[in-house]
Amino acid sequence: MAASTDPTTVATEIERARHLPGRDDWVSPHRNLATLLAARADATPDAPFLVYFDDDAGIERRWSYAETAAAVARAAGWLRGLGIGQGDRVAFLLGNLDHTIVLYLASWALGACVAPVNAAEAPDRKRFILENARARALVSRSLYADEARELARAQGVPLALVVEPGEDAGDAIAYPAAAEAAEPVDLAAAAFDAHGVEALLIYTSGTTGAPKGVRVDQYSILADADAMAAWHGWDASLRAMCVLPIHHVNGIIVTHVTPLYVGGTAVLNARFQSRSFWGRVAREGVRVVSVVPTLLEFLLEADAAGEADPPARDVDLAALETVVCGAGPLLVDTAAAFEERFGVPLTHGYGLSETTCYNCHLPPDLDAATRRAWLTEHGFPSIGCALPHQELAILDAEGEPVADGVRGEIAVRGNVVSLGYFERPDANAEAFRGGWFRSGDEGFRQTDPAGRAFFFITGRLKELIIRGGVNYSPLEIDEVLNAHPDVRYGLAVPFANRIYGEEVAAYVVPQEGAEPDAESILDFCRERLDFARAPKVLVFGQDVPYTTTGKPKRIELSRQLADELARYRDTQFRKPKG
């Protein structure tokens, strides 16, 4: 039976999921994000908050807390002059810039909402986001000026272009010059409570249908920052490096809001570059970097090819406590290879935009052998234990908890759960049920001798390959494909088959210079997987189909390969003899 889309019922379910039974809801000493920044600037005005590098443009800028607060106050005053206030939304087509962080904070100082737009999105999706979000203004990087002008004109909203010295904004508002002339806002006087004040409208990167806007309030952002800081013991000495896009919650919250929360420093890169990664970590005394599994693969490849300058082995990484990794499927072999090659502990974690950012991490007190066991000995790397201010569970189809080792749906509840999807009662009714946010991800848990529940993700429920009525996780097959020495990237995808409903295919991007034989890779998989899981056919390609947040585009790839694989629709694949 379909879940009720009655507005009152849906609202009640969302509120139930946003609270922990019997616990105090207010988890932060800060009333909102504006008063947080004001407090930091007042306590440590000269301490570094933001360091920005654009290697391609030769730009390096450093912002103290006082300089950041002053720029945010002026930018907030400028936005207020455009008519932006509490509850309004501003769209940002910016990418990784230091000014992006200033403008996000300025919007939050007014109680306004940031609607980030991924520059890599298709034009029609950008138009949809601006229209659906009902943005009151668009702020764009000058690099995207022509497209931004069209978008702003179509929506009838003012356009501001962020320009570097010497650049011309043309008929658009030139930022930051316009903000420098504005009357600053008093950040410390921001009177609103964070609860229910929408701060982010993050559009999901679904492969079918229109994107869904996830409404994250200031309260949940503060709660998640507090949770990560408390879990890891992060304080004002934290220097967190961002190499991920800041149109997504990971780049925004882990490596910017959390350092702000503890009075630390954010080191922002315009883009990820394997060549300069280790040198920057060492020179900036970085303690934490947040990445996705794809970037671990890139770092391993660059090291093997001798492309890093300097390589990790030639720099002092003593300050680097951990690399946090999430937002995509992490292979066991990748986790083990990264720790072995670089000697840096890997903190695997899990979270979603719908639950603000991270919901669980591996505990920081694990010794190397125990951490390695949780990463490698259960078929999937553990995503860790629930962070403070939230609970995780593995639920069956009826919403009941299952036993250790039994697969079910990962569910989250607590102070980090979002306000739900914007104007999507159908999606809200499906996701918020029984006092939980139902993630759509399949997983299981195992309990350690101390009674701590360690969680694992085995794949998206909608991505499971259903062969002969049995569900198979594609991640298990990915693991084997990627272990082949000639495979740079391998992804298991389903295809329609008359005999079993779905069968397993492999999409493979070969290593540079390699010319692997398809049958040899299939034989490699058959030796390591049972017949049902082993790929039956293989398609070679050259593109690595990942989203900008490191998630494989498995459903989209399956759709793209459908015509090519249709020839096998009536084939009954038989287990080889012997």
Image (cartoon, rainbow, N blue to C red):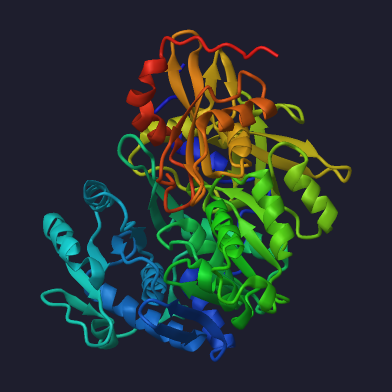
| 409 or 199, nearer to the observer | 409
At a point 54% along the width and 28% down the height, the residue shown is 519
Where residue 347 sits in the image (x, y, percent)?
A: 68, 57
What percent of the width, then of the height, locates residue 37? 50, 77
72 shown above or below 251: below
Q: 225 above or below 421? A: below
> Residue 234 appears at what percent x and percent y?
68, 70
Name the residue located 45 percent from the left edge and 78 percent from the top edge. Answer: 53
Left or right: residue 50 compared with residue 444? left
Q: Quadrant of the C terminus?
A: top right
Q: Nearer the viewer, residue 199 or 549?
A: 549
Give the number of callouts.
0
**Outermost residue to the bottom:** 46
**Residue at (63, 33) in percent of width and height:** 476
Side (left or right) of 89 relative to 258: left
Q: In the rendered view, does 552 fall on the left or right side of 397?
A: left
Work out whether 505 lies above or below 455: above
| The residue positioned farthest toward the right in the image shown | 449
Confirm whether residue 417 shows in the render.
yes
Q: Is residue 235 visible?
A: no
Query: Measured from the top left, where is residue 115 in percent x and y?
Result: 34, 58
Residue 107 in which image quadrant:
bottom left
Location of residue 247 with respect to 310 vertically, above or below = above
Q: Which is nearer the eye, 279 or 324?
A: 279
Who is closer to the viewer here, 445 or 354?
A: 445
